[in-house]
Image (spheres, rainbow, N blue to C red):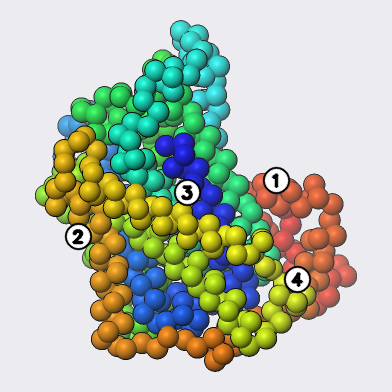
């Protein structure tokens, strides 16, 4: 777990570094789907959009968390129905409601992670009722590489599912008021947050919960979060229920976010003429009713399909498919970045010499690292499919569990390429004009003002909980500055 999460969290930095470079210069709503179309091949753009859209696994975790309170007695169909209603009713309300829902649940998730880290540290240091100070016995006495490479491959897939969908930041960054500030900011902040929060949490899990605990998923009986198990073992009443409630809220927020992003991805694909244009239609309030409707129907189907196979089995399949889609998109982003630089060089474009130009740190380090780890995850899928955990031998069912997502994405892309005979873009004529954004005088003044601040003031902008805009006397053209609020 520690190695798998470490590798995947490093990919968050690589993804955002690679995406930010293109997004800041070309902040289009389609983001990396648009970039793959204009600099590589429309078939690759279809691949990227389809892979980002094909995600659904949150309902399984919702059921697991709910069953903790019901001791396994709550019907699965009822749990899935509650999840669907809770997720989709928000899209019947004004868009502002969704924005506030995401903001509030994000705050809850942040405080939940901080609570988990503080509690875990306290338990390790002996704050439990028995005053027990953990001595690392689970690292010393239990197998460090349980289930050998297949076990590591499963950890890679689960880590990719948990951490991997940071590309949505690029999608939202493309619609930001000032992408040069927002994307550059997010590239540092989100990378640090992912590595700090996830890695600390994973290390604490390995210290506090043995890998052979029967209360873990797949161990038998009612499964629970490892954090809940650790806090229960420390005999801290009430805290397990707070953690479980917070994680349920987090799962609902992630699911709603996935539906929102997926529906917008479909609409982007229609604007790029990758799929039929009727899907892009919106209602009187600007909601993409066609793409949202299709996304909801497919999500409902993937949710209720769990009734036919059982929770754990369906979860494994959905996590494998989703993880495959994520690291395939990482590969696409990395390859598109290389083509982007090739196009700039072929056309002698002075992009990186412009004022406040933003270039990926030590390029091509980020895309090369991203492609390398994605290839390792692909090898992990193949290894886990051929040699399943438990020495059960090769089975077709297990093989397709790990490889189905890869087969779906690759086959759909090849079919699209063959049917529509999409062109491979020539670097000398590839589009470097559409959607290109040069910094305005106001944005340059704003960035001047930001970088003139002492480093400690700039650091505070990374820990703020909200921003407000206010006019400042003497600002050119009534420039609005984003001020830090504590």
Q: Which residue is drawn at 54% across and 72% down?
A: 338
| Residue topped by disc 4 | 356
Q: Which of 278 and 271 is in front in this view?
A: 271
- Residue 191 image offset from top left, x and y in percent: 58, 51
Q: Element under label 2? A: helix
Alpha carbon separation for disc pair 1 and 4: 28 Å
| 3 vs 1, front mark | 3
Q: Which residue is drawn at 39% across and 24% down?
A: 209
Alpha carbon separation for disc pair 3 and 4: 30 Å
Q: Element under label 4? A: loop
| 1 vs 4, front mark | 4
Upstream in sequence: badge 1 or badge 4: 4
Upstream in sequence: badge 1 or badge 2: 2
Q: Nearer the viewer, residue 147 or 443?
A: 147
Classed neighbour count for the residue bearing mark 4: other residues with Cα under 10 Å, few (<14), some (14–19), many (≥20): some
Could you tell me if residue 468 is visible in this image? yes
Alpha carbon separation for disc pair 1 and 2: 43 Å
Q: Quadrant of residue 138?
A: top left
Q: Which residue is drawn at 48% across and 10% down?
A: 132
Q: Element under label 3? A: helix
Q: Do the residues labelled 4 and 2 touch (CB within 8 Å)?
A: no
Q: Which residue lies furthest to the top in this view?
A: 130
Upstream in sequence: badge 3 or badge 4: 3
| 1 vs 2, front mark | 2
Alpha carbon separation for disc pair 4 and 2: 47 Å
| 3 vs 4, front mark | 3
Q: Residue 486 carries which label?
A: 1
| Residue topped by disc 3 | 8
Residue 428 vs residue 78: left or right?
right
Classed neighbour count for the residue bearing mark 1: other residues with Cα under 10 Å, few (<14), some (14–19), many (≥20): few
| Residue topped by disc 2 | 301
Upstream in sequence: badge 3 or badge 1: 3
């Amino acid at each position: 777990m520690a190695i798998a999460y470490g590798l995947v969290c490093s990919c968050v930095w690589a993804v955002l570094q690679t995406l930010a470079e293109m997004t800041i210069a070309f902040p289009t709503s389609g983001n990396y789907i648009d970039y793959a179309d204009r600099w590589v091949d429309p078939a690759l753009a279809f691949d990227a959009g389809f892979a980002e859209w094909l995600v659904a696994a949150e309902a399984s975790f919702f059921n697991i968390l709910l069953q903790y309170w019901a001791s396994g007695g709550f019907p699965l169909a009822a749990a899935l129905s509650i999840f669907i209603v809770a997720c989709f009713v928000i899209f019947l309300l004004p868009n502002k409601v969704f924005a506030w829902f995401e903001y509030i649940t994000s705050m809850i998730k942040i405080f939940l992670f901080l609570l988990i880290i503080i509690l875990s540290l306290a338990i390790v240091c002996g704050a439990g009722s028995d005053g027990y100070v953990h001595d690392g016995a689970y690292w010393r006495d239990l197998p460090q590489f349980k289930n050998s490479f297949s076990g590591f491959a499963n950890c890679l897939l689960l880590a990719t599912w948990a951490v991997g969908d940071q590309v949505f930041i690029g999608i939202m960054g493309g619609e930001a008021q000032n992408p040069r500030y927002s994307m550059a900011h997010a590239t540092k902040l989100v990378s640090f947050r992912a590595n700090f929060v996830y890695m600390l949490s994973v290390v604490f899990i390995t210290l506090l919960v043995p890998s052979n605990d029967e209360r873990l998923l797949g161990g038998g009986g009612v499964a629970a979060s490892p954090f809940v198990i650790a806090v229960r073992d420390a005999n801290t009443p009430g805290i397990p229920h707070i953690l479980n409630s917070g994680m349920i809220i987090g799962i609902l927020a992630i699911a709603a976010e996935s539906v929102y992003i997926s529906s917008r991805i479909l609409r982007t694909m229609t604007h790029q003429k990758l799929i039929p244009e009727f899907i892009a239609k919106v209602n009187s309030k600007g909601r993409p009713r066609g793409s949202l409707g299709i996304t909801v129907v497919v999500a409902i189907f993937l949710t209720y399909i769990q009734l036919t196979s059982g929770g754990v089995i369906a979860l494994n399949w959905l996590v494998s498919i989703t993880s495959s889609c994520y690291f395939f998109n990482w590969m696409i982003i990395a390859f598109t970045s290389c083509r982007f630089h090739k196009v700039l060089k072929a056309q002698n474009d002075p992009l990186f010499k412009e004022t406040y130009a933003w270039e990926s740190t030590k390029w091509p380090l980020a895309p090369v690292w991203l492609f390398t780890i994605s290839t390792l995850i692909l090898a992990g899928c193949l290894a886990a499919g051929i040699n399943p955990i438990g020495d059960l031998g090769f089975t077709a069912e297990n093989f397709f569990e790990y490889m189905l997502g890869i087969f779906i994405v690759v086959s759909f892309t090849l079919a699209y390429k063959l049917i529509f005979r999409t062109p491979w873009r020539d670097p000398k004529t590839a589009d470097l004009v559409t959607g290109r954004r040069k910094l305005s005088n106001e944005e340059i003044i704003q960035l001047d003002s930001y970088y003139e601040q002492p480093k400690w003031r700039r650091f505070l902008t990374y820990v703020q909980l909200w921003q407000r805009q206010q006019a400042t006397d003497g600002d050119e053209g009534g420039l609005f500055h984003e001020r830090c609020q504590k």
